[in-house]
Image (spheres, coloured by chain):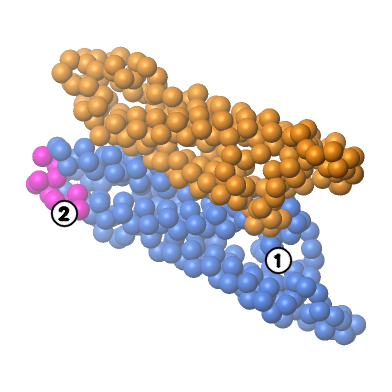
Chain colours: A orange, B blue
């Protein structure tokens, strides 16, 4: 595990205030192959890409407000197991994405991870994987239920807005899954870098 | 991309018959750090692990024969969208796992990939990812439908064996998903090795 100072330097960000003799070495740091402008740009682009995926995953998995008020007559969305599952999975992923956005901004701004490096990298990847499967599972269950409800004339014909809202929520959830899946590819790549190179950077 | 000869040597297998002057260098190959006994053992263990995961994924995703004959009265399993999806996803994954078992045996026996190295590594990883999500999606949809059928007294009470068979198929599918998910972690690691090291080996 590297010191925050070194992490900041490797990531090409301005190091935090440091003692004079270290400042003196700053030019030397920039000579290492890790600090070529190209490498710094690539690492920065990688971090921004992660941030954008996190933002998109958050945006799409936020349960739309009308989902919460979705009911028709005597039955509500929370009467159906699968819709409760969709709601819970989306809410978990939205909260997680919010946290990961903070982590991502932190890394872009200061070149530091919030947890120690190894813990952070494994935490991100394992949660990305599990939550991506969770989200996919929830949306599929929701889709299966929505299809059954559509065949059941009593539910969807008398209240087509109810079924429409359910469809919209599920479609948004699938989009959220897509971006979480992309994030999990990137965080998986960082885990592999950690295993192979001993640091989360691939350059 | 490396020549088959070099791949075989790196993987620690006996190289295929080679011209005399190359035979002469054989001892030299064994001196490179890649050919320490430990590294060879690790690579071999990695390949065997992949093979075992493939075998397990194949075993669990093979649709049980009784699934195909699963019907009660006038309705059959293929009358239900979600069960058709479960069957199709399981069949696709079973075929794919069978192919990947051949690839894996090929690699263990000769230290070679069937397709060119980069193509093979990306092919394995992308299909593992997509099929793992597909399998998860199918089982979740199947579970949601099975739950609805259980509430519907007419279907499950008059033929509880029908519902039981559906549950077993879905449970096996989830187990298959688990092993395919593990495979995708390993093949993802090989992709990362290819990107970072330029070869599918991590040592």
Looking at the rendered structure, the secondary structure element under dot 2 is helix
Task: Name the residue nearer the viewer: B156 or A91.
Answer: A91
In which chain is the residue bearing label 1? B
Residue at image point 19% right, 40% down: B149
Residue receiving disc 1: B203
Q: Residue B161 carries which label?
A: 2
Q: Note whether residue A143 is visible.
A: no
Q: Which chain carries label 2?
A: B
**Main secondary-structure element of the magenta-colored stretch:** helix
Q: Give the range drawn in magenta.
A: B153-164
Q: Which of marks 2 and 1 is in front?
A: 1
> Is residue B156 magenta-colored?
yes
Q: Going by the image, does B141 lie left or right of B120?
A: left
Tag of residue B6: none
Q: Which of B29 and A104 is in front in this view?
A: A104
Q: Is residue A179 above or below residue A1?
A: above
Q: Which residue is drawn at 75% across and 45% down?
A: A6
Residue A103 found in image quarter: top right
């Amino acid at each position: 595990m590297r010191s925050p100072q070194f992490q900041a330097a490797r990531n090409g960000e301005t190091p935090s205030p440091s003692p004079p003799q270290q400042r003196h070495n700053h030019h030397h740091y920039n000579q290492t192959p890790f600090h070529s402008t190209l490498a710094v740009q690539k690492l920065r682009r990688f971090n921004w890409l992660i941030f954008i995926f996190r933002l998109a995953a958050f945006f799409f998995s936020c349960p739309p407000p009308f989902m919460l008020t979705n009911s028709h007559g005597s039955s509500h969305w929370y009467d159906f197991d699968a819709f409760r599952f969709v709601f819970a999975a989306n809410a978990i992923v939205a909260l997680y994405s919010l946290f990961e956005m903070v982590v991502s901004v932190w890394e872009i701004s200061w070149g530091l991870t919030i947890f120690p490096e190894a813990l952070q990298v494994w935490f991100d990847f394992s949660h990305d994987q599990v939550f991506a499967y969770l989200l996919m599972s929830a949306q599929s269950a929701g889709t299966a239920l929505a299809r059954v409800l559509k065949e059941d004339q009593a539910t969807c014909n008398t209240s087509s807005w109810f079924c429409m809202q359910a469809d919209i929520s599920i479609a948004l959830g699938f989009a959220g899954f897509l971006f979480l899946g992309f994030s999990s590819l990137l965080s998986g790549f960082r885990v592999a870098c950690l295993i192979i190179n001993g640091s989360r950077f691939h350059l």
